[in-house]
Amino acid sequence: MDALRHVLLLVHLAGMAVLLGGFLLQAMSNDLRITAPIFIGAPAQLVSGALLVLVDHHIDHHLDAAKISTKLVIALVVTGIVHATRRRVPSPPPVFYGAFALAAANVVIAYAWS
């Protein structure tokens, strides 16, 4: 079970890198649209995070319910925004940067909330 947790953690971190990297590349190029890395990274984060919680619960790791709930809500919102605006070219700047900020906030919450 521990090996599965490590694989899921690797997928979760890769999804984070793809999601935030996709947002950064688009923001730096001033081409605010939802590209394939963003479109793939958002649900990868959501699914791998949910599976990590299930595995951690099964292993009896202590989980902070408030932290997990907050991160889940943010991940759902980011995924919803990404899926809702994927065909709008360019994405409205407040929506694009809002989704980017929420995705980055999820990383900060994961790191800083103990």
Image (spheres, rainbow, N blue to C red):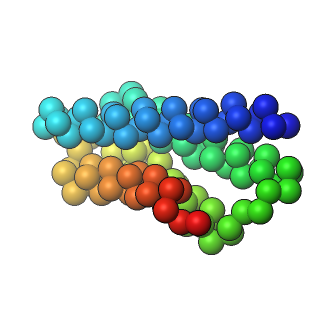
x then y, percent, for residue 18: 42, 32
Quadrant in the picture for residue 30: top left
Q: Residue at x 70, y 35 (%)?
A: 6
Whether residue 5 is situated above or below residue 95 in the rendered picture: above
Q: Residue furthest top?
A: 36
- Would residue 89 be visible to someone looking at this image? no
Q: What is the residue that sits farthest to the bottom in this orientation?
A: 66
Image label count: 0
Give coordinates of residue 51: x percent, y percent.
Answer: 71, 44
Where, by quadrant of the figure, is residue 101 drawn? bottom left
Spot occupied by residue 84 in the image (x, y as percentages of width and height): 39, 47
In the picture provided, is 38 more to the left or to the right than 67? Answer: left
Residue 112 lies, in percent from the top left, at 49, 62
Answer left or right for 43 relative to 27. Answer: right
Residue found farthest to the left = 30
Closer to the camera, 90 or 56?
56
The quadrant of the rendering that contains the N terminus is top right
Q: Residue at 25% of width from left, 52% of height from top?
A: 97
Up-down relation of residue 70 to residue 50 (above or below): below
Residue 94 located left or right of residue 51: left
The answer to whether residue 97 is seen in the rendering is yes
The relative height of residue 65 versus residue 15 in the rendered view (above or below) is below
Which image quarter is the C terminus in? bottom right
- Residue at image position (38%, 52%) is 104
Residue beneath the point at 58% across and 58% down: 72
